[in-house]
Image (cartoon, grey):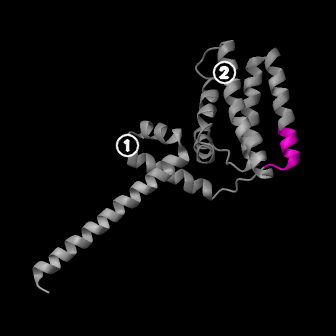
Amino acid sequence: MNTGTIIALIIVVALVLIGFWLWNRRREQEAIREQFGPEYERTVAEVGDRGKAMDELAARRHRVEKLDIRSLTNEEFERFSLQWREVQAHFVDNPTEAIHQADGLITQLMGVRGYPMSDFDQRAADISVDHPHVVEHYRAAHEMLPSWGGRDATTEELRQAMVHYRALFDELLVHDQARKTA
């Protein structure tokens, strides 16, 4: 083989390797986009770059894979269901306190399921891996907590926060139980 043929062969091999790398990266991006749904676009907007967003979401997935996330026992399911009904009933008399209780109950439920109880942003990131379609409810409800923003929330804002918490609660409790029994 002459030098020209060797160089051409090296170029072809390099192009094939680059093509394979690009194809694999695109396939991985589609898998992450499919897994994370709306959380993918939110993360892209937050970090400003699709590659960085993809790396962030892949790191989240890797972190959560190492966690021991579990389903609730039947007794835990019943206890959390009862507590949620009590929080909802309390909303009528004291919406502000009920929102704080809902936030605490969600945090407690996440802890029992095995999610680490670090700061809110980390909890939201961890939840986004397995529950990407409801994590935005968690963020929205948390932002509406009356202690945030230095002002009292309106009744409508409190109602909306409760709706958001309910969506996450249903996903973490009810849908988990349905998957467990199916």
Give me the residue at 81% from left, 51% from top.
181
Give me the residue at 47% from left, 49% from top.
56
The residues bearing labels 1 and 2 have C-alpha atoms spaced at a distance of 31 Å
Give left or right: position of 41 versus 81. left
Q: In which quarter of the image is residue 16?
A: bottom left
Residue named by callout 2? 160
Tell me the element at label 1.
loop
Check disc 2: other Cα within 10 Å, few if <14, some if 14-19, many if 20+. some
Residue 165: say if magenta: no
Q: Give the range drawn in magenta.
A: 72-80
Check disc 1: other Cα within 10 Å, few if <14, some if 14-19, many if 20+. few
Please tell me the numbered disc located at residue 49.
Answer: 1
Residue 146 visible in rendering: no
Q: Position of residue 17 (x, y in %)?
A: 31, 68
Q: Which residue is at the far front?
A: 182
Give left or right: position of 137 versus 44. right
Please tell me the numbered disc located at residue 112.
Answer: none
Say what amino acid the circle numbered 1 marks: Asp
Give the quarter of the figure containing the N terminus: bottom left
